[in-house]
Image (tube, helix red, strand yellow):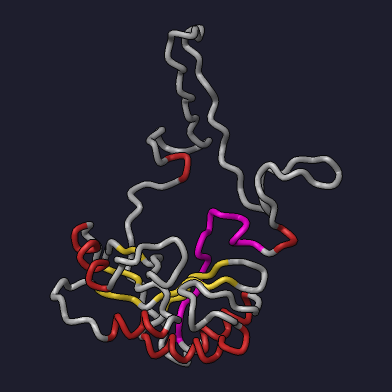
Amino acid sequence: MLLNADLHIHSPYSMATSRSMTPESLLAAAKMKGLDVLGSGDALHPAWRAAWRDRPEDGSGIVVVPTVEVEDRHRVHHLILAESFDQFAELADLFAPHSKNVATAGRPHVALDGAAIASAVHDLGGLIGPAHAFTPWTSSTPGSRARPGATAANGSTSSNSGSLPTLPTPQASLTSPVSPSSPVPMPTAQPRSGSAGSSPGSMLGCRGCGGSSTRLPARGSP
């Protein structure tokens, strides 16, 4: 069963968000975009949990999955999913001794490492994964993190972080000399070796990126 889902959003309680974001406006926009599943975002925030609990039935048929993004002690960002907002209330209590803003920020900082956060989430029957899989400086530990173009002490320049794979570099194809009055030719992307065709998404290996139904593990299951 294929589903259209957006599981990573935020609320007015996170930075750089609109104050007009409400459960009602989010559900209306999700319906307009053809989504079947919508993550709540910011489910550790008590007021945002209450807003979702108290909303009137809208009849949209959209499934709302309680979600949150947290930043760990190494500034790695994790996306957490659970079956109920009550589970996030319990998780907020567990994180409170390790966070100064778990009750006030939509995207809180938790002074634990990723393994400890994942263990707490799994104990409550939730799911956890990288919030920004293609952003190295929020998805890797400090020892393997380097912003592209950073210069190391030995003078070498980093173009990647850790052991993340490097996408092929597009090669420019100049069909005619460039003069001040002529348009600048656009680079022609080269498909990966062994890939089928050269569609716009082939360099990222994305063909018909559809969603899928995910069943959360039963509480207490390994």
Which residue is rendered at x = 63% and y = 67% of the image? 75
Picture coordinates of residue 106, whole percent (x, y):
46, 74
What range of the chain is rendered magenta? Answer: 125-140
- Within the image, what quadrant is residue 138 found in? bottom right
Q: Residue at x 63, y 52 (%)?
A: 164
Give the residue at x 45% y 69%: 14
Q: Is residue 206 above or below residue 64?
A: above
Relative depth, front residue between 17 and 93: 17
Is 150 placed above or below 100 here? above
Tag count: 0
| Residue 52, position as x, y percentages in the image | 29, 81
Q: Residue at x 41, y 81 (%)?
A: 82
Q: Is residue 192 above or below residue 178?
A: below
- Residue 109: x and y in percent read 58, 74
Q: Nearer the viewer, residue 23 or 195?
A: 23
Q: Residue furthest left?
A: 59
Q: Nearer the viewer, residue 150 or 198?
A: 150
Is residue 185 placed above or below 191 in the rendered structure?
Answer: above
Q: Is residue 117 magenta?
A: no
Which residue is outermost to the right? 154
* Image coords of residue 181 (percent x, y): 44, 8
In the image, taking residue 138 as reference, residue 81 lies left or right, namely left
In the image, 26: left or right of 159?
left
Q: Quadrant of the N terminus?
A: bottom left
Is residue 133 within the magenta segment? yes
